[in-house]
Amino acid sequence: MSQITDVEAARRCARAIASDISLYNTEKVQEGIEQDTLFEILQDEIEEGREYYKNKVSAEIYDKYNFYDRAIVDVLIKNKAHVKSRIW
């Protein structure tokens, strides 16, 4: 299996992984945002996704860009602004 070496493809991969985490853990995401414990509740899923992403992209892309963490924030948090939370 070849690694992703294209920057835009790596960004899309990171967002797809974050979207899968969100899709398959809807209740956990909502609870985590409501209780401000999102990263604790989804720690295993986020780390599993990070390892998958790290193995999919080239070392240069992984070391140079922060696509995975940005995707986690954009997909799991920004897209859930409608969820009531004491943090916003």
Image: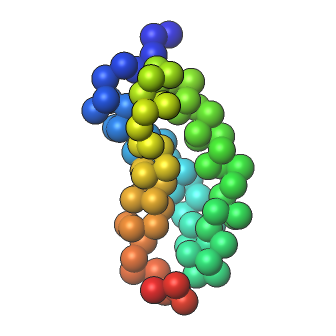
**59 left or right of 25 in image:** left
Q: Is residue 77 above or below residue 62?
A: below
Image quadrant where one finds the C terminus: bottom left
Residue 74, quarter of picture: bottom left
**52 left or right of 65 in image:** right
Residue most extreme to the front: 64
Residue most extreme to the bottom: 86
Q: Nearer the viewer, residue 43 or 23?
A: 43
Q: Is residue 20 above or below residue 38?
A: above
Colour convention? rainbow
**50 left or right of 3 in image:** right
Residue most extreme to the left: 8
Q: Nearer the viewer, residue 82 or 63?
A: 63
Residue at position x 50%, y 22% from top? 59
Residue at position x 31%, y 23% from top? 6
Decide if residue 19 is in sight here.
Answer: no
Count of numbered badges drawn on the protein: 0
Residue at position x 45%, y 10% from top? 2
Q: Nearer the viewer, residue 5 or 46?
A: 5
Residue 71 placed where, x, y %?
42, 50
Q: Is residue 34 above or below residue 73?
A: below
Residue 41 placed where, x, y %?
70, 64
Residue at position x 66%, y 44% from top? 47
Residue 33 placed where, x, y %?
56, 75
Decide if residue 86 is in sight here.
Answer: yes
Residue 85 placed where, x, y %?
52, 85
